Amino acid sequence: MLDFSEFSGLVLFMFIFTVGFWLLIFLLTFVVPYWIGGTILENWKLKKEAKEAAEGK
């Protein structure tokens, strides 16, 4: 049987582990694709503007 300090340590460990797991899942499924997609879109717009500026001169 666990005493209170062991039980509270186990609960704290499981809470931190679970929060870290779900944060990792959130980052991999939402934040990273949004970041990569935004970077690609921004680079595409910059190349398009540079091409239009070069054709305009």
Image (cartoon, grey):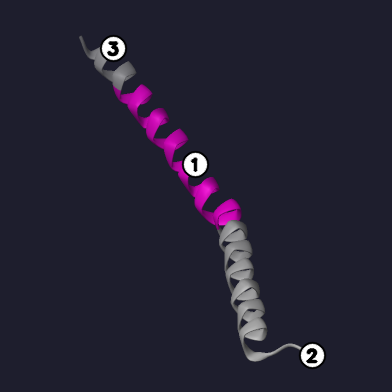
Residue 24 is labelled as: none
Q: Position of residue 6 (x, y in %)?
A: 66, 82
Depicted 11 relative to depicted 17: above or below? below
Question: Of 9 and 17, which appears nearest the observer?
Answer: 9
Region of the chain picked out in magenta, as a range: 27-49
According to the picture, the residue beneath numbered tag 1 turns out to be 37
Of labels 1 and 2, earlier in sequence is: 2
Label 2, residues with CA under 10 Å away: few <14, some 14-19, many ≥20? few
Q: Tell me the CA gap for discs 3 and 2.
A: 78 Å
Amino acid type at mark 2:
Met
Q: What residue did someone put label 2 on? A: 1
Residue indicated by mark 3 = 55
Residue 54 percent location from the top left of the image:
27, 11
**Looking at the image, is mark 1 or mark 2 nearer the viewer?**
2
Q: Residue at x 59, y 77 (%)?
A: 12
Q: Amino acid at mark 1?
A: Gly
Indicate yes or no whether the magenta region holds residue 37: yes
The residue mark sitting in front, 3 or 2, is: 2
Q: CA distance from mark 1 to mark 3?
A: 27 Å
| Residue for point 36% across, 31% down | 45
Q: Indicate the quadrant where residue 42 lies.
A: top left
Residue 19, by quadrant, is bottom right
**Most extreme residue toward the top, as rendered?**
57
Q: Position of residue 51 (x, y in %)?
A: 33, 17
Dominant SS of magenta comes to helix
Quadrant where the image shows the C terminus: top left
Element marked by disc 2: loop
In terms of secondary structure, where does tag 1 sit? Answer: helix
